[in-house]
Image (cartoon, rainbow, N blue to C red):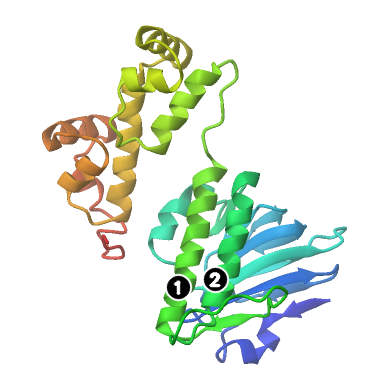
Amino acid sequence: MTVSADALPETAAPGDPAPPPGLVVVGHYDQPPGYGVDRPRGADSWLVTWTTGGRGRLRHGSARTRATAGALVVLAPGVPHGYGVEPGARHWEFWWVHCQARPSWRTWLRPYDTGAGLYVVTPTPDSVHSRVEAAFRRMLADARWTGTEAPPVLVPGDESVAVAHGTAARELALCALEEIVLLTTGTARAPRPSPGVDARISRAQALIAADPAAAHTVRSLAAHVALSPSRFAHLFTQQLGRSPMRALREARLRHAARLLESTDLSVERVAAASGFASPFHFNRVFRERYGTPPGAYRAPGSMVGAGLVKAP
């Protein structure tokens, strides 16, 4: 049977079909066929789901998606939505969180926007699933913290809904959720080996992507993949169409652009954090790549320019 959240006033303020944005509400469900929730007016809070078993179906505006194990699906506020067990599935087991998203999360989620603020982060590798699950369990325990003594330890089997009322409990819970967003968005689209590319070159690509600001050189990258510098440089350029150092520069520029979008770090600090020793050189190559200097890149309509994100 489909449930209308509008008929559950005890879970929301009057006229609000979901928990209000000031709270963090987290829970774990394993629902049978026929379970569903419909919010024809959307919600004021964000909804995050992580599927651990079975299959779910989510609708957000005109966008729809299917959720299977290892899928993080995020619904932005203000859009009519609904979700439930996928027809024909035996059940849907999932974690869910209602909260106010931190502004920086939009940057990480942006590549996964399927339309109208429905973010589908998949596929996530099996290697991160256990850590994501642990972060959800920690979030459920942290949401119950009273602010005195240590946060509680989650008792196995006690997965009832928790509401983080206190400021400290909310921030702890959001820190766990931020870890989940980072783990999933950072691995779901990790570079996949290109067909026909030598495994050693793929490993070098992964090293560059993982830490573009590191002091990589042709010699250091070659040593990581057990090739001579000359053989490595030749093979890399032959198979990828650009030199290792050109690929490194592109990775550093992409990293710098993300920092400019999501923080208020000075241009000089962005340059240093992206591996550029000279701010002058950084300004020149950034302008060549993006058609505008770094300071102007972040100004119009950016989250930083709007005062939504502050550097730590």
Vertical side of 270 occupied by 301: above or below = below
Q: Which residue is mark 2?
A: 139
Evaluate if marks 2 and 1 touch, with contact meaning CB atoms under 8 Å apart.
Answer: yes
Marking on residue 172: 1
Of helix, strand and loop, which one carries label 1?
A: helix
- Outermost residue on the left side: it is 280
Q: Name the residue: 49% across, 26% down.
A: 203
Of labels 2 and 1, earlier in sequence is 2
Determine whether the residue tagged by mark 2 lies in a helix, strand or loop: helix
Q: Nearer the viewer, residue 109 or 233?
A: 233
- Label 1 amino acid? Leu
Residue at 39% across, 19% down: 223
Crowd rating for badge 1 (residues with CA inside 10 Å; few <14, some 14–19, many 20+): some
Q: Is residue 45 left or right of residue 259?
A: right
Q: Residue at x 32, y 59 (%)?
A: 303
Residue 245 in percent (x, y) is at 31, 21
In x, y percent, where is residue 100? 46, 73
Using the rendered view, name the quadrant where residue 289 is placed: top left
Q: Is residue 69 visible?
A: yes
Note whether residue 79 is visible: no
Report crowding for label 2: few under 14, some 14 to 19, many 20 or more residues within 10 A (C-alpha). many
At x 58%, y 74%, the residue is 140
